[in-house]
Image (cartoon, grey):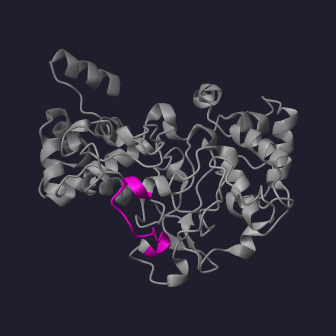
Amino acid sequence: MVLILLQTAVCLGETPALDKQALGQALFFDNNLSLTRKQSCGTCHEPGRAFTDSRDNGVSGAVSLGDDGHSLGNRNAPMITYASHVPEFHKNENGEYSGGFFMDGRAVTMEVQAREPFLNPIEMAMPDTAAVVARVRENPSYVNALQANFGTNVFSSDEQAFNAIATSIVAFERSGRFSTFDSRYDRYLRGDYTLTAEEEIGRMLFFSQLVNCHSCHLSDLRETASGELFTNHKYNNIGIPENQALREKSARSEPDIGLLANPRVNDRSQQGKFRVPSLRNVAVTGPYMHNGVFEELETAILFYDKYLLSTASSQTNPETGTGWGQPETAENVEVTLLRGGQPITPQRASALAAFLRTLTDQRYEALLEE
């Protein structure tokens, strides 16, 4: 019946309205929805790079460039593959903050998150919701699709229309394109791939009590659990050092306070905590940490030895040849958590990195060879 209606519409010269998912995809990649018409959601979340930003911008890709062509953000653009599996921002049964969107969880839901980049003064820089809606209304197919999917009165207020725009983008982000679960690790669980010796050592280390990866990067401790996102969705301050190169190029001088920047959080003990990211596609979505301070995956892994060993090598960032640097927020660093497990030697780091590479979606495996 749907096919007959579509064929009839085509014969009559009508263009069928886009469904929510297709509309969301079009909006996601539309540069016209930023102030200078040069930047879209897809600019900072490239589909060919697991929906992260691969541009350098003079800071080794640590953060994204703004719509004005020169302003820099202060956080690394997060991967949005598998984002639809992140729970809404809440306190769990232990009273711990969990879930939410952006690294500080300030957006309770994906729909709230989808609104913010349009109005962020650096990202897409639109002055208000009315301006966004006006840009959308320039495109007749958008108007047709929004009315078809949300009712003919969808433009009765700018807020209502803006919510419909965000909902459409989220419909696209919830599509199977973002959550394929077809990595080598997923194929291994299904019996369709055999891990190499190093990958297997890394897998055993990751799930073991020898190193402490499982404390933050597993929601299901069973080694055979399918659909694992490799995050517990909670928030931690692991003492990430300030990105000096970024600080020198940006106008910001204040430290990033993380979870405490969330308007729903007023407990100063949460300062400097960031949501634990999923490790899916981690090998192709560097640089790493909330401020992009580490360029290599092995560096991010070896960083944890800073809290486990006092040797010269454990206190040295292999990318710079100097010390790791002081944490942005030193008073809340979770030292007890960081001192769990045994040291991560270079050999263990290599094996763990080999395992983490198996978490790469099949369509991005070619990037591992770059």
Identify the image quadrant of residue 57.
Answer: top left
* Of the pair 118 and 160, the residue shown nearer to us: 118
Note whether 327 is above or below 277 in the view shown.
below
Residue under the point 73% across and 33% down: 187
* Residue 44 drawn in magenta: no
Residue 168, position as x, y percentages in the image: 32, 46
Q: Which segment is the magenta one? A: 247-260
Identify the image quadrant of residue 355.
Answer: top right
Residue 348, position as x, y percentages in the image: 83, 48
Q: Main secondary structure of the magenta part?
A: loop
* Of the pair 68 and 172, the residue shown nearer to us: 68
In-image side of 4 versus 82 (left or right): left
Residue under the point 71% across and 43% down: 356
* Residue 258 drawn in magenta: yes
Residue 222, position as x, y percentages in the image: 80, 55
Q: Please say whether residue 1 is visible from this viewpoint.
A: no
Residue under the point 53% across and 69% down: 328
Identify the image quadrant of residue 65.
Answer: top left
In-image side of 342 versus 104 (left or right): right
* Of the pair 47 and 155, the residue shown nearer to us: 47
